[in-house]
Amino acid sequence: MSHEQKLEHTLTYLHSELNRLETMAGTMASIEQEHFKKLTNYDHRELNDIAVEEKTAARQLGSMKQMCLSMAQRINELKNEWHHEESRENHNHVEIH
Amino acid sequence: MWKYIDSLMRTAINRTVDRTVLRAIRDQYTENVMEMIPATTKVGVTNLLEIAMRANQGTPLSRPLGSPIHASPWDRLFFNPVHLFRFPTQDNVQIQTAVTIGKRAKRPLTVSIPILIAGMSFGGALSKKTKIALARASSIIGTATNTGEAGLLEAERENAQLLIGQYNRGGWLNQADKYKRLDAIEIQLGQGAQGSAPQRTTAKNIGPEFREVFTLKKGEAAEIKSRLPGVHTKDDFIQLVHRLQEEAEVPVGLKICASHHLEKELQIAIEAGVDFITLDGAEGGTHGGAPTLQDDVGLPTLFAIARAADYFASKGITDEISLIATGGLVTPGQMMKALALGADCIYIGTAALMALVSEQMTKTIPFEAPTSLVVYAGKMTDQLDVTQATQNLVRYFNAVLQEMELVAISLGKTSLSDLSKTDLCTLDPFISKATGIELGYVAPEKQTAFFEEFQPEIYQSIDPVISEETRLH
């Protein structure tokens, strides 16, 4: 396997894992949100503080989701640019021959 | 026995009040203490106090927390809830609050909420304990805190997951070994409560740790110059931005006091390629500053945001350069309106400090000001409970965010970054014309007709001379 192929496989792997992480972060954020709702039902100060932590965690998971999404986009852009360059090089190569 | 005392007291109070009232009525103003009432009404309580303080000190006053004048008419803006024409967001949908600052930077900065903790320096403004509490709370919430104009306080760096540092006019954070440890760099050329004026902390107010963090010699004052060391031309500034971006690889931004020269300042920042711009409106806070700088200098935050957002849109760079707004944003509604006007995120300083002190203010009142718990030179800084302060701030942020999320649901939005001017209406025709927010008095399709029909009347209310000229033309 050439160095370029290896790099492309790695990028593809990172892209799919980032998509998975994004989904996981979204799911976990929903769970945290549910916990927040349940914990605020009791009108108990300590439980309320735990609920606030859950809500904060949900927001942080939301930002993880956004970070995964933008990283996946960057990888996609990188792959597209690379493919574009590769096809241009192949085209030039064909023209020369 | 108690009945007798009660009766005695009532008689005493009655006689005293009667005599006071009669005295107030019978004495001429020149002999009458009640003269204070019209005098204070004319001058204002704050101004009266500050006149007396100036007369006593003979030097500029150092008023804490910024101007008491509310120059931005936030209360003239209202959000537009939806019901049928567009449906509100379902309540099980998590409102997205994350924001990325400096999307073009090599390492952009993503925060979980669009509210950051403003630059309030260790030493120059706040105590070490307060800085630690702010840093800890910011890490729990997933936002960033700011060094203010200071050196790098190790305890702040250790406790803050995300730290924005001010490349400052004192030069205390301007060394590569310090700014390379930051998550974003904000070149500080001014602030709402101080303009670009110099500031000075005298040596007597500087303790050993302050000296160490600021690398000052014993007996040396901490001085903030009016200009950044080494930056005297536009090109100097552009080169500085490029150098910092190259060396630190984090978002590099500019912080200024908003003014009527706004677009000219923004243009230079755009040419320099900054990743974000922080605009501090005239209502911005400070640990202490001259009242004239606070009350009479700068552009109110609301108009600064609207003008900057318009300028970015006209240049097609809205998505490239992040706009951070600050200055007098106290309520969740004001913060949210700032976002709707075009800010990507906002800084809060005064409100964060008040939330941090909140329950602990009972330690200070009635004999000391609550700020004595948090300011560096305060008498009671050792009594601040950092854990409780952190907890209070985390609770405050959550409450603010939840209120904002409720409004977002009512507007039919799924993300705070989706807020825009179309989510607002205003009750002020001038704000409507200046900002592009529709006027709430008439239906959207009647806006143009309204302004055409009432143009002379609107001018009349500003200036009769302009009105006459408009009529003649």
Image (cartoon, helix red, strand yellow):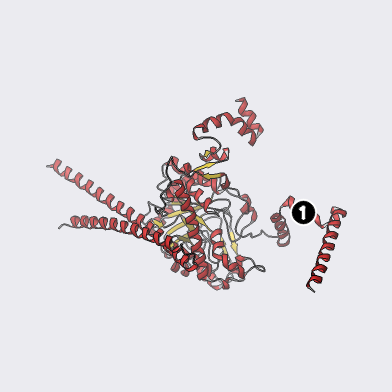
Q: Position of residue A80 (x, y in %)?
A: 25, 48
Q: Pick the residue in front: A63 or A53.
A: A53
- Lateral position of residue B459 relative to residue B23, left or right: left
Which of B202 and B302 lies nearest the eye of the viewer? Answer: B302
Residue B378 horizontal side relative to residue B271, left or right: right
- Position of residue B380 relative to residue B99, above or below, is below
Q: Position of residue B179 (x, y in %)?
A: 43, 62
**Which corner quadrant of the image does residue B429 belong to?**
top right
Q: Is residue B169 above or below residue B264?
A: below
Residue B360 seen in render: yes
On the rendered structure, is A13 left or right of B276? left
Quarter where residue B217 is shown: bottom right
Subunit of label 1: B
The residue at 85%/60% (across/down) is B19
* Left or right: where B25 falls relative to B217: right
Query: Where is residue B407 drawn, in percent x and y?
Result: 48, 50
Instruction: Give the image quarter of residue B362.
Output: bottom right
Mark 1 neighbour class, 10 Å CA radius: few under 14, some 14 to 19, many 20 or more: few
Foreground pick, B59 / B317? B317
- Amino acid residing under circle 1: Ile
Residue receiving disc 1: B37
